[in-house]
Amino acid sequence: MKGYKCDRCGNFFEDYEIQGYAVICEGKTRTKEGKSTMHIAIEGIDLCADCTEKFYEWKGDKESPSPPLTWREEMQKFDKHNNKYEIEEITLLTIEEAEELPRWILATGRWWWLRSPGFNLDYAAYVYTDGSVYSSGFYVSSGGVCVRPALRIRNLDSLNLEVGTTFKVLDRPVYYIGNNKVLLCEDIGEHRFDIKSNDYKHSEIKDWLEKWLDNEKNKR
């Protein structure tokens, strides 16, 4: 069991007790002296159950409501409601999708394919080691470029997760990237895009991805 340190009292508590959350207390509060103060913002702190209760008491709530669910609890709730993740599609990112993501999500230290075509029929776009997107592309027949799948998961956006939130799907760490999609944190190996064409819908890499997903599901 992983231990956490409360950001207020300094006491340690175990991860099943974690109360970390992001909350904005809007409006005005009053000090003990009755003076009005500016609104308070607390983002992503870890509070033990005791300090969470004291925070709500200090904020002036008549009752101490439960804090918003942490992402761990959200995912547990999501699992229970949806009978685990319903993966609707496995694919690669497009140039446009990749360019909307922070560089730290894209950079893996390895090259990996995008599904968008490059500057001619023999090239497909890719992401460089440092997270740069190369729309001109690389030879589709190259076997030295990695495959980093994106998964579309039914109703995932209902959790209101932030882009970059990490959790596990198929026992693999993933980043939430919006539009009901997650991106695996690491690639799943190297594979050529196709022997001759950058048409993703009819490519070898699309078939390879779908077989990989079937194998992963069958392990469970």
Image (cartoon, rainbow, N blue to C red):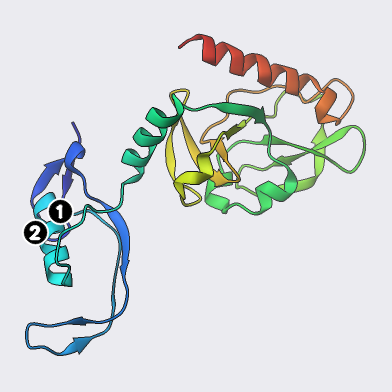
Indicate left or right for 132 with 120 as reference.
left
Task: Give the distance between the C-alpha atoms of the residues marked 1 and 2, in whole angstroms.
Answer: 6 Å
Disc number for residue 49: none
Identify the residue shown where x is 31% and y is 79%: 27
Q: Secondary structure at mark 1?
A: loop
Identify the residue shown where x is 70% and y is 17%: 208
Question: Which corner quadrant holds the N terminus?
Answer: top left
Dot 1 and dot 2 residues touching (CB under 8 Å)? yes
Above or below 145: residue 95: below
Identify the residue shown where x is 70% and y is 21%: 191
Indicate left or right for 73 with 31 as reference.
right
Say which amino acid is labelled 2: Cys
Identify the residue shown where x is 52% and y is 9%: 218
Q: Position of residue 185 (x, y in %)?
A: 51, 36
Q: Which residue is mark 1?
A: 6
Q: Residues within 10 Å of mark 2 (few under 14, many from 20)?
A: few
Residue furthest front in the image: 62
Q: Secondary structure at mark 2?
A: loop
Q: Position of residue 102 (x, y in %)?
A: 56, 54
Q: Nearer the viewer, residue 206 or 67?
A: 67
Q: Which residue is mark 2?
A: 9
Q: Position of residue 194 (x, y in %)?
A: 82, 22
Question: Which corner quadrant holds the C terminus?
Answer: top left
Q: Nearer the viewer, residue 74 or 149?
A: 74
Q: Is residue 140 visible?
A: no
The image quadrant of residue 14 is: top left
Say which amino acid is labelled 1: Cys
